Image: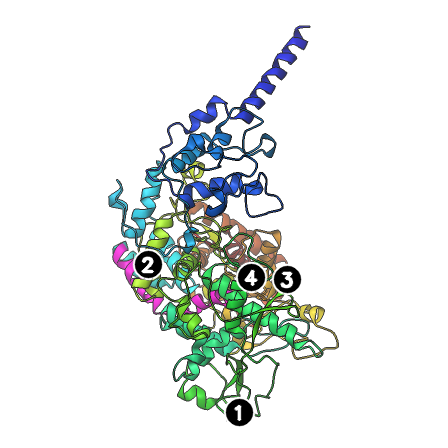
Amino acid sequence: MKLKISVLVTLIGVIVLIYAFKVGVFQGEKDAYVNQKLPDVVDYNFHIKPILSDNCYTCHGPDANKRKAGLRLDIESAAFLELPESPGKYAIVKGKPNQSLLYKHVTTNDVKQLMPPVDSNLKLTAYEKQLLKKWIEQGAKFEKHWAFITPKKNKVPKAEGEAWVQNEIDAFVLEQLEANNLKPSEKASKETLIRRVSLDLTGLPPKQEQLQVLTSSSIEEGLNQVIDTFLASPAYGERMTQVWLDVARYADSHGYQDDSYRSMWPWRDWVIHAFNNNLPYDTFLTWQLAGDLLLNANIEQILATGFNRNHPITQEGGVIQEEYQSYYVVDRTNTLGKGVLGLTLECAKCHDHKYDPLSQKDYYEMYSFFNNVKEKGLQMDAVQAANKKFFADPPYITISDEVVNEELNFVNKEAGEAVKVMVMNDSMPRKTHIFNRGEYDQLGEVVEPNTPSVILPFSDDLPKNRLGLAKWVTDTNNPLTARVFVNRIWAMLFGKGLVLTAEDFGVQGSLPTHPQLLDWLAVDFMEHDWDIKYLLKKIMLSATYQQSSVATPELIAADPENKLLGRASRFRMSGEMIRDYILATSGLLNTEIGGSSVKPYQPAGLWEETNAGGNRGILTKYIPDTGDKLYRRSLYTFWKRTLPPPNMSVFDAPNRDLCEVRRQNTNTPLQALALQNDVQVLEAARVLAERTIFEEGIKNAKSIIKKVFKRILIREPKEEELTTLESYYSDALKRFLGEKEKAVQLVALGDYESLGTDPVKTAALMLTAQVIYNLDETITKE
């Protein structure tokens, strides 16, 4: 009997607890927020809208089919209307929370009246309720979406830990850390910093002499010097270009079914040249969007417009030309939206955007800027046009020896060949219609070139063509362009942007973790003439960037995702950077700049499995290059859309059918297997082992292992690390002494000529180097 009573009491207690949680009267919930300070001024975008979006929009948002009680809270004009089901009552009454049904329903103790409903499993915290109350008291002011408001250079805050602050960036970061009772991390070691800066600016490990510059001087003086050195390096342009190629959906093949060859690599060489010459970002964009429309445009400016032609193009016979014409223009429009403006414009292709204030008409007005290019496939053979500066068909140009010598000396072209590159030319003015339901053959209203006024009205002084569009995009009053680029640079350096959704600054995107910092950087960037190198150096000289990535238990508990930037971010390098890092540390890397794409090692038979059948075209079978071409930077690896380089795809590289601004970052067993078995990695380990033995001899195992370790990780090994590796080396050496033929077979991997060192010792050291190449630290930016 006592047992039954005990069980009954327990059940009643559970029921009471569940009820208390549901109605929001559980005392702990109130106590948890009682000491959280409300802001002096409640901001709609950053305080109120997230509450409404997470808890209210499902039933009172943009979806008319799901809307209840006739109440819509996502737009100002509807939120203040009289409620159709409650005459004389309003959801929001400015200055009067107790008369506002919104506030009354989220604070009531009546379960039947409580909002959000109990069965939704949503509930506002006490702090959120107080925010709503104060917002209504302050006039319930709605605002445009934060990203559509022109950024302002906010006053730099002052914080208690001023000694840590090295520039304005740190002041904004420290303000938020201190508000959350947190402290920044200590400065990273000199070895970690030089490696971090080198990877960020060149995509390659630092050289020993660069490490000595940092270690032989004060960290401030040395870091300033090495940053300048890296920014002046040709490898800097290659590093920046690697990031831009995903945005520009660059590939060496056309895509679609046949996926045949195209020669867009001179445009890629131009991008490298532009970054190395520090072309201002506004100019960089203008040339790519509309270089052909500039007054007295030169061939370099016209070449830059290849950006707009990087999209997939069908080579199949019998297609409906008008259909594919629409696909290409849609791609250019969407690329501008995602890659430059940080917007999901494509969501307005078939109907008005469900969340952002973008209509279908807005979409096709933007579309019309790109709708005047003649798209009829390949019109002229390169040999026929070898002596002409321009092709007869305007969307293509020829780059001959003469053009390279006189105007495009940055294009690394083999002598005697004429290279054809697709570019822009508005040679065929066309009417643009709204496509009903997004269907190319369902023509609706005719529209003229224009831009969404919610972002920035299109000035009457601008020409209604791509040049006018470029000027609109780079207008300092455009609220998106500078913010989006600054955020992308931040993501490149920190692993994720101040706005996590780098591709979406719209209503459904993430809020910035440090909105005032983002705006300050965006305005500062424009004030310094859109200078990309200035922006990079500014961020790198901050104490925020220079922190250690070692996370303390306090930081992990309080900020596990490192949104407050209390430590440096630690994340895996891209597939391209991993391969380049391995080539560079082994001494194999061919540092030639530019030129046609190359074909390094790749598993046999993959291209044959993906071709269209009938062995059509020159890309049906993968034939690897030989010699130094095998060791070019990954930037130059041939990119076939239907099968991108597998050693990069396995590390989350996109196929580049579409614009991508944020790669996924996965961790899979396949990645580890690729690093263990890729011929390129094994060959690099073999070459590094041979060179170390050749240069140092084998005085003792510990000495040569230390050399290999430092060559790869840019630091001295710890004693326990050295002991483990020495044991591994000894075991491998014993095994190969008994199986010499296997050692000979192992060191024969790869095309690079052997130095003739002892195969047994080389094989043992080769496997030791391979272990180091497979370490998490090796493939991670610390």
| Residue 445 x %, y % | 58, 68
Q: Earlier in the sequence, mark 4 or mark 2?
A: 4
Name the residue tied to disc 3.
437
What is the chief secondary structure element of the magenta stretch?
helix
Toward the top, the furthest residue is 1
Front-most of residues 492 and 22: 22
**Residue range corresponding to the magenta coloring:** 220-248
Q: Amino acid at mark 1?
A: Ala
Name the residue tied to disc 1.
386
Q: Report helix, strand or loop for mark 3.
A: helix
Position of 373 with respect to 544 (left or right) is right
Position of 155 with respect to 399 (left or right) is left
Look at the picture and state if 719 lies above or below 584: above
Alpha carbons under labels 3 and 2: distance apart: 39 Å
Name the residue tied to disc 4.
360
Alpha carbons under labels 1 and 4: distance apart: 44 Å
Q: Amino acid at mark 4?
A: Gln
